[in-house]
Amino acid sequence: MAAARAVSKKEPTAAAAEPESIESIDTKEIKTPSKKQGSGNGGLFSVPLILLAIAAAFFAGTQNVAHAPLSRHLANSTSHLLPDSTIELAGPSADPATISNLFAFPGNKYASEVVHVVPRRVLTPDAACTAAPIVVREHVHVEEAMGHADALRATNHVLLLLNGRDEGIVLEWSKDAGCLHALTSAAATALGANPDYFANGLRLYNRHGDAIATADELDMERLAYILVDFQVWVWPGIRVGYTRVVHGITMTTLSLSPLVFDIEGFFTSEEAEAIIEHGLVTIKRSSVAKGDDHYASDTTRTSHTAFLDDTQFTRNFRVRAAALTRLPSPAFVERAQLVRYEAGQFFRKHEDYFHMDTFRASAAGATPRDVYKGWCAFASAILVTHDQLDGVVDDAARPGGPLFPSFDDKVTWQHAWLRLVLEKEPTLLDDIGLEEWTAWIKTSLDVNAPDIVDSILSGIGHVLPSLIRVWETHAAKNHPDLHFETPKPPVNGVAHYFRWIQWAKDRVAALGDDVPSDFRPTGSAYPTLNLAFQNKLMQFLLEDHTKDELAARITPDWADWLVTNKDAKNVVLDGARNDVVVFDLVVAAWTKRAGLDLFAYEKPKHMQHSEPNRFLTLFLYLNDVDEGGETVFPRSKERLATDIKRDGMDECSQGLAVPPRKLHTSLFYSMDGDNQVDPMSNHGGCPPAKGIKYGANLFTWNFDADEGANALGF
């Protein structure tokens, strides 16, 4: 399976070539960042990090979570979990018969513990909570509050942070007051979360990743993390060198950006041997994605890989990984993938997430270029008509000046704006993993290339608000009349569909036996991302509506298209992308059968677009390597080893590089606390100089992993 796609180079425009993505370039030539290639056989490989034997250099700081067993995360009704309801992290029994059974096919996934979902504990608004919570302090590091619940309680204070963050705000709060939703909403707003999303659900979690929904639970530690809508938990790094013990497993923070942990105690030597033995049966040359070919060979990846079969052995790892990472379901974890690196074999720097945006479609007027044009018109109109800006904003930003925003000016204005960015905030792009774009912009400016901004909007349009902010700060001097609010486009019907699938699974888990049998995990109408479920929805829709009735709700052409393509691939997604009413209709048809009283869905007015993708990676080191085989995170500012030189991989001498050590596991996030892909997670597998390296990937997703892969066409 691939995790990125390569794109052919575009023809150069003047001296600067068109950009193709947010990824790396050869800075010796005037080229724009190009698409990264991804791995095949299930995903981009990383040889994640282990902790060097320099732990003494780290400051002490241990958080023991032994009192919060991992099994609790999978709810109190998980007696069906294997090997038993308390998740054993020490591996399978040494009994030969038991081990043999572990490698037999265990039956239907949807009748197993793999699809168990931990329902959200969403906070409920209380109309009686009218007093606005008072913010006492901002930018408070979490370590100031850890272990100080009594002091916080004595002063009626509580510390709240956003998901995965290490700094938050202290607010006034008493247990008797309750009002958790009002408290959380006020804190999330002050911390910069988007209030438009709060109606979709606010949640609190303690520092061990356990949900909080009562005043008594919050009062225990007086410290909590805020998750919005269906955000997935991210372990906070706290600081480099910080160590926590999670039910016998030691997690040590190696890097905060990207967020990387060393894990010790996650698996056993016997399990390592079993992974190697069973993986070698089907191992083959690793592959990458190139365009529509998800399984192409490429010189950027020369290792060998094999996915293990679906067995109780691999399912146990899925359960175990979900419990450690606090994922809502073991289904979010892929089956283990064996990776073998022989001497000299490598995988150049890459990301584990997919560069596809398969389902994202911008509404009219909502592309980065549209927003840029709208901002130029907004700012220039204010600057021309406002009669009290002289001496307030920079003279260069006034009409006729080089920093006067002009959509039609492809050289003078654009160059002045970008030079302002490079002068005032030179690491703006570097800090989010886009250092190659910084180099490209500098080179394009040096050769006086035209329309550089158009290339930026095509390749990394998501940075436009940050570039605008630099102009507002340093040219407009933060004048309030020149502050631009990015228009919020209507929610895409496909985004609605993906969120509804998440909601429906969550609701089924919460209702349990009250759900009709056909709509439970083993039923034919259980909501999934699998392509066949869309055809099931179309069956329901066409049972309820004639083509003429559909034509009255959408258009005659689209009604005819739906009827004709009812059995086609992605019929619901294609219809919903064109008209959100298609989404409304299929959900109504499903709900009618599942139970209106059980599954009344309130469609969000606003939400963050989310689609299936890789979320974090657990990489298990299965053996010691004689020399080499480091994992490198070239964008990290941390250094555990220096002067590393590996043939064919210059990036091995950059950033954070850690050599492999048997029975350690590396956990690193491909998404940030907002559950957006994190370019800082770029990493590479350096070649062993001597010996062979064996590892195992446990890729995890923000959705059911198997279903997500099916939806993406793998």
Image (tube, grey):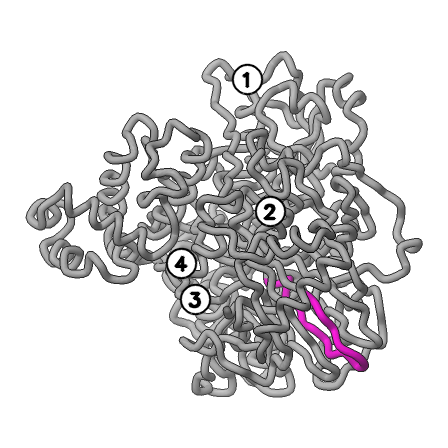
Report the residue that reaches farthest toward the front: 97
Q: Amino acid at mark 1?
A: Ala
Q: Is 694 within the magenta?
A: yes
Depth order, front residue of 625/351: 625
Q: Amino acid at mark 3?
A: Phe
Q: Residues within 10 Å of mark 4 (few under 14, many from 20)?
A: some
Q: Give the tally of numbered discs.
A: 4
Task: Choose mark 2 or mark 3, whichever is in front.
Answer: 2
Q: Secondary structure at mark 2?
A: helix
Residues at marks 3 and 4, CA–CA distance in whole angstroms: 34 Å
Q: Determine which of the numbered discs, if any, sits on residue 714 in the image.
A: 3
Q: From the image, tell me which residue sits under label 2.
A: 319
Above or below — where is 44 with respect to 606? below
Q: Who comes first in sequence, dot 2 or dot 1?
A: 1
Q: Secondary structure at mark 1?
A: loop
Residues at marks 4 and 1, CA–CA distance in whole angstroms: 37 Å
Q: Amino acid at mark 4?
A: Val
